[in-house]
Image: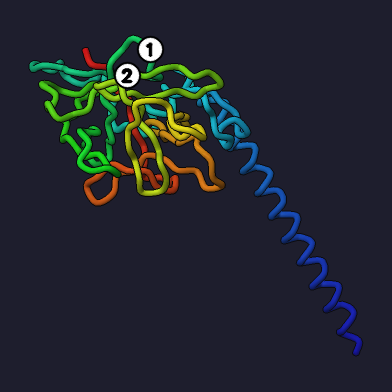
Amino acid sequence: MRWVVPFVSFCAGSSFGILTMCCMIANRWNEKEKEVMANAGGSGKQDREPCNLLLTDHFNWKWSLGYSADPAALPAWEGELAAKLAFRPEEGHTYVIYHESSGNAIAQKVSDAAYGPAACEAYGDALTGPLPEEAQRFTVKDAGDGKLYILTADGSYLTCVGSGVLSATEEPADGDRSLWELQPVSGGCYIVSAGPGNTPLALQYYAEHFNTYKLNYTGIYIFNEIM
């Protein structure tokens, strides 16, 4: 029995030492994360919270993290450049909405519930021309509070009718279903419906169609202003 008390004391001391070491490592990791975020131009708290306004500075460093090369370092493109990267779409300009991971822009409506793809080629921070004729041309209308309407070429409002149903209506739909929010992420932004429901719905590219489904990490888009 004489070894029991020393053994228990040894175990308690070891456990305390391990706990102390874990706390020190966690604290150093937290400080390093804060340092990285400060160098990137943001804070840990701001980076974790959704942002309704796609601000130029915030988007610029985020987008550069997800981009594999500095556009300024690329050789000059000898052909036609058709559309340039836009930080946040503004009224009075025309855009194509580009899904970089698939290499497609949103094209014309192919059913009552989805839009088709139009293959585009990106070079640096621009899309090369000529743009496919079927690529949908969009304009936007500011709705305030960080929200906007996205209008198709014929002036219809891009509308999230529900999960799996992306359509266009002549007038803004009830329940804010025609309102959208842009949430900046590395490499572009999520285009999220401001409509009702507990589960956010966003533009997604699935089975070679553009539609609205539950927000996930594959639905990253870039607005490109037609030059």
Q: Residue 91: x and y, percent?
A: 38, 12
How many numbered marks, from 0 up?
2
Q: Residue 182: x and y, percent?
A: 45, 29
Q: In which quarter of the image is the N terminus?
A: bottom right
Q: In this view, does 178 lie above or below 161?
A: above
Q: Is residue 145 above or below residue 178?
A: above
The kind of residue on which mark 1 rests is Glu
**Residue at disc 1, secondary structure:** loop
Left or right, residue 191 beside residue 6: left
The kind of residue on which mark 2 rests is Thr
**Residue at the bottom extreme?**
1
**Residue at disc 2, secondary structure:** strand
**Residue at the left extreme?**
79
**CA distance for labels 2 and 1:** 7 Å
Q: Mark 1 points at which residue?
A: 91
Q: Which of 33 and 155 is in front in this view?
A: 155
**Marks 1 and 2: in contact by CB < 8 Å?**
yes
Q: Which residue is drawn at 40% across and 47% down?
A: 213
Q: Residue at x 64, y 41 (%)?
A: 30
State the colouring used for the structure image. Answer: rainbow
Q: In this view, does 4 lie above or below 86?
A: below
Instruction: Determine which quarter of the picture holds residue 14.
Output: bottom right
Instruction: Determine which quarter of the picture holds residue 76.
Output: top left
Q: Mark 2 points at which residue?
A: 139
Q: Residue 157: x and y, percent?
A: 36, 27
Q: Quadrant of the C terminus?
A: top left
Q: Which residue is drawn at 25% across and 22% down?
A: 154
